[in-house]
């Protein structure tokens, strides 16, 4: 371990004496830059990454400094769960989301500057510096041109990566309830190939109708069409697949509940682009011309199609989007242009969109006609002999919901004495349904489904019930009867009802399917119960 | 018991000797009319109605004759279940549906005439005559003008009446699988008031837009608009409510599974009528004019409304129908005009339609804003304190399915020896979902849901998946493992998946609600198993 120079006391906060510092060093002009004063050890990224528990010490980094925040974790105003998401990593990507930590305009070229009270907390906790040489090596390695994944964008460390190449990353459950629209950096990622490196100045979209009529659009030409904005949640067809593996192995990413996120998308309506290209742009005309589907193709080669009724319906709200939450699309989400097909499974929302074509039939390829998005019965353990052309592709997904607060295995204090009035558990989560069907009710149970309590619907509940493309947040104070609490553990459960009055099935066993699609069984979260003091 | 004159041998079939007949009487010109020959006892309708079991004898009547068909029941080519539906009643209404019993054109004024082979079977089974005086009294009584229900139409005896005044009658489960479109006489009936007696010559429909613009249409004027035909199933929101009462009492008719039926409706599109009346007839124009809903009012005072998007969408297929299965609407189904709102709960399909009006808000009244069609949570045992204006009305119903064959408590023969190959049970039923969402799969179990088998979809499966207004029939040969069969009883179960990949929840407990709406829990049919010979 090398010995470096510490900046811990340079903010005028006295050292706690546990660490070697130079208390007499003068404060530099930029407090968070490595200065010549002080002596602190140097750590590798790998070493920092092992410090993620209270037992081993919770470490984070900020601008090259390493901090042991173990003693602070319990006092974090944003909650223990949230700060622990950054354990073993840099806090910078988190503070760029939770900007209350930073001084205004602190994203200048010289780096983020914490607010004074944050700096006062942080300074005495510094235990070392990151090794600058190792950080430089890491950057060079990522830029290796022989690697098809050399140009992958930097990803937020809070994304729960299931696979890096291609990237599959979940939105972190601990942060999902913080914001109804998911920050771009925390939006789940599901790529099938390396992220294409595209230039929005030279980018063109090709649009063709059945007769072979083709028109190209530059991004500027698309931007000149009427702008439309839609807030829509996207969900991977395999969200919550991991739970199905407890019944029998499925194929595909073993997603938790984080393969769903919500954003406000801005772009142009597909129906307006079809009209501008001279293609049939209403259902009757299109069907009369023999058009049954509109095919979407990405630069990475992924293709899918949507029925012409959805593609041409103004109330279907299908967009070709160039902005996500008010910013240009990030590379992971389709820069410079993607399809947003509200109410449809994620895979139909083709990213890096280069071609839109009217077709008689649905798209060819695994994403549309293959097994990838075909849901077989719970008795079908092999696709051999199944005529997939007879099986409907997954387009709209069923009604679903999940508990975000508390997290699994949380400790909850409750009255356990016989005859005591029931304590309540504060439960929060999201609910969503495909096809724009709004959420009309969420039922929550603190006794594994024996009794239910109607939740209060929050953000998202004011959407039109037939065009509720975005999820609905909900919360409930759920009674936890003393007799249940006395057992020391219970399961919280939620289930939602959508505008079609569909609801969720009880168990994963009955929705199990070979590809692990559309798991919408009741969401159960085990918690332990400790006696109320 | 009076003694009458029998016609039993008049068809030239020898008597079985158990009954007094005049074997020597000459055959009259009309064999099924009461003749002067023969001596048979006279029975009351009430007495016939007690003969509905093999133990007591299975009796039916035909053109005033009483027949003991006990010995024939097992030999009925159409099956025991079907013929037993007529036990204790007249077979005439059944034979008018199952016309293979009758000679062609036998509906002449002189009454139905059976085919020769039917007559040969029936004749020797005659045991008496109905009392003509009692039949005449019954007719007079029904015509009492002081009774608001004096003019109710005659109903098919196979309708399972839950209430006669107003009429609530189920389609009989034993006959539902016989025909994909339900015969008009067997279509379930749900009236809220006496059936209005209307004259199609003087009938008018009033159509108004928001500005107060009103236009009246005669039936002839409506018929002059473009004709449209749609096959759509209608389902009462309370279908299968009876099962919920096993959890806790609900309010309303304790329907079995027969409050759903399917018909081909012919009439004019609502959107064309709105246009002809000068009212806004596309969603954008209507919404810009402040129209949110289209209200429908029946002559009986029942009102409901549908969202303007559904009302004006050409693909929504909303009809004002004047024909049902190629015949004028029967009085019980809205003669001379009704709304057909495909994919919506039965109550929105207003019968005896007299007024259509564009409105800003949904209709007032119990059917739209009241508790009648509001689905509360499983924990809500009283509507006191519930703000019903915040609760969505039931419009689209969730995916459902039911087993029609075998019927509950049927005896099924199966292999029960350990290690024997599983026998199979032939299971048939229907599946349907609201909103036009087609049925993409039905899973069937012969072991109460432990294992599943994918059914074969039949009639209805070729409908477009986003406009599948009619139910889908299905059947499956479901393996019944010997170990299960050996227990002597099991439960058959079915559950369906619709095009949105929603499926049915397992248990009635979790979908229980105060009003008993939208029960779509797995449908379970207990059967007993006897060892295979």
Image (cartoon, coloured by chain):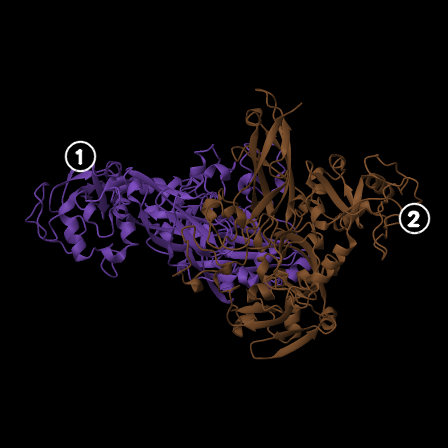
Chain colours: A brown, B purple
Pointer 1 residue:
B1
- Position of the N terminus of chain B, as image quadrant, is top left
Tell which residue pokes out farthest to the left in this image.
Answer: B24
Counting from the top left corner in percent of width and height, residue A406 is at: 64, 38
Left or right of residue B342, residue B210 in this image: right
Q: Dot 1 lies on which element?
A: loop
Can residue A319 be spotted in the picture? no
Can residue A262 be spotted in the picture? yes
The chain identifier of the residue carrying mark 1 reads B
- What is the crowding at mark 2: few (fewer than 14 residues within 10 Å), some, or many (at least 20)? some
Q: CA distance from mark 1 to mark 2?
A: 120 Å
- Residue B217 placement: quadrant: bottom right
Q: Are marks 1 and 2 in contact (CB under 8 Å)?
A: no
- Position of the C terminus of chain B, as image quadrant, is top left
Viewer-proximal residue among A278 and A330:
A330
- Residue B413 placement: quadrant: top left
Mark 1 or 2: in front is 2
Q: Dot 2 lies on which element?
A: loop
Q: Which mark is residue A28?
A: 2
Left or right of residue A246, residue B213 in this image: right
Left or right of residue B170, residue B21 in this image: left
Counting from the top left corner in percent of width and height, residue B526 is at: 34, 40
For residue B385, above or below residue A259: above
Counting from the top left corner in percent of width and height, residue A439 is at: 60, 47
The residue lying at 18 percent from left, 46 percent from top is: B72
């Amino acid at each position: 371990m090398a010995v470096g120079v510490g900046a811990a006391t340079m903010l005028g906060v006295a050292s706690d004496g546990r660490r070697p510092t130079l208390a007499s060093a003068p404060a530099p002009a930029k407090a968070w830059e490595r200065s010549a004063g002080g002596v602190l050890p140097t750590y590798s990224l790998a070493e920092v990454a092992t410090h993620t528990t209270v037992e081993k010490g919770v470490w984070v980094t900020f601008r090259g400094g390493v901090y042991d925040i173990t003693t602070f974790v319990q006092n974090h105003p944003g909650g223990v769960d949230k700060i622990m998401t950054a354990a073993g990593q840099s806090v910078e990507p988190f503070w760029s989301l939770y900007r209350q930590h930073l001084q205004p305009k602190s994203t200048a070229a010289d780096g983020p500057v914490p607010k004074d009270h944050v700096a006062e907390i942080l300074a005495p906790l510094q235990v070392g510096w990151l090794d600058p040489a190792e950080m430089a090596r890491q950057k060079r390695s990522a830029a290796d041109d022989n690697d098809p994944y050399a140009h992958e964008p930097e990803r937020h460390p809070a994304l729960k990566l299931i696979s890096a190449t291609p990237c599959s990353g979940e939105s972190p459950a601990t942060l999902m309830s913080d914001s109804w629209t998911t920050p771009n950096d925390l939006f789940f990622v599901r790529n099938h190939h390396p992220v294409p490196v595209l230039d929005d100045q030279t980018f063109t979209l090709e649009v063709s109708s059945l007769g072979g009529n083709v028109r190209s659009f530059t991004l500027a030409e698309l931007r000149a069409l009427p702008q439309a904005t839609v807030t829509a949640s996207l969900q991977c067809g395999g969200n919550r697949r991991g739970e199905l593996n407890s019944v029998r192995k499925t194929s595909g990413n073993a997603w938790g509940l984080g393969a769903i996120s919500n954003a406000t998308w801005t772009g142009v309506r597909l129906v307006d682009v079809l009209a501008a290209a001279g293609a049939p742009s209403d259902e009757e005309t299109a069907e009369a011309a023999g058009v049954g589907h509109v095919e979407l193709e990405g630069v990475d080669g992924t293709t899918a199609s949507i029925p012409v009724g959805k593609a041409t319906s103004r109330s279907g709200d299908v967009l070709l989007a160039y902005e996500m939450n008010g910013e240009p699309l990030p590379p992971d989400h389709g820069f410079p242009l993607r399809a947003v097909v509200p109410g449809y499974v994620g895979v139909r929302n083709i990213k890096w969109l280069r071609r839109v074509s009217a077709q008689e039939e649905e798209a060819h390829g695994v994403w549309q006609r293959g097994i990838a998005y075909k849901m077989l019965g719970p008795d079908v353990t092999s696709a051999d002999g199944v005529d997939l052309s007879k099986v409907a592709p997954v387009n709209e997904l069923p009604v679903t919901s999940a508990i975000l607060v508390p997290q699994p295995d949380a400790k909850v204090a409750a009255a356990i004495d016989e005859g005591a009035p029931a304590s309540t558990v504060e439960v929060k989560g999201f609910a969503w349904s495909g096809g724009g069907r709004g959420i009309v009710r969420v039922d929550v149970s603190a006794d594994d489904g024996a009794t239910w309590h109607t939740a209060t619907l929050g953000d998202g509940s004011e959407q039109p019930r037939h065009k509720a493309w975005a999820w609905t947040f909900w919360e409930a104070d759920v009674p936890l009867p003393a007799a249940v609490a006395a057992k020391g553990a219970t399961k919280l459960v939620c289930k939602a009802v959508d505008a079609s009055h569909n609801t969720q099935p009880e168990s994963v066993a009955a929705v199990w399917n070979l590809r692990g699609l559309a798991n919408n069984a009741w969401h159960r979260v085990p918690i332990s119960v400790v006696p109320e003091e």
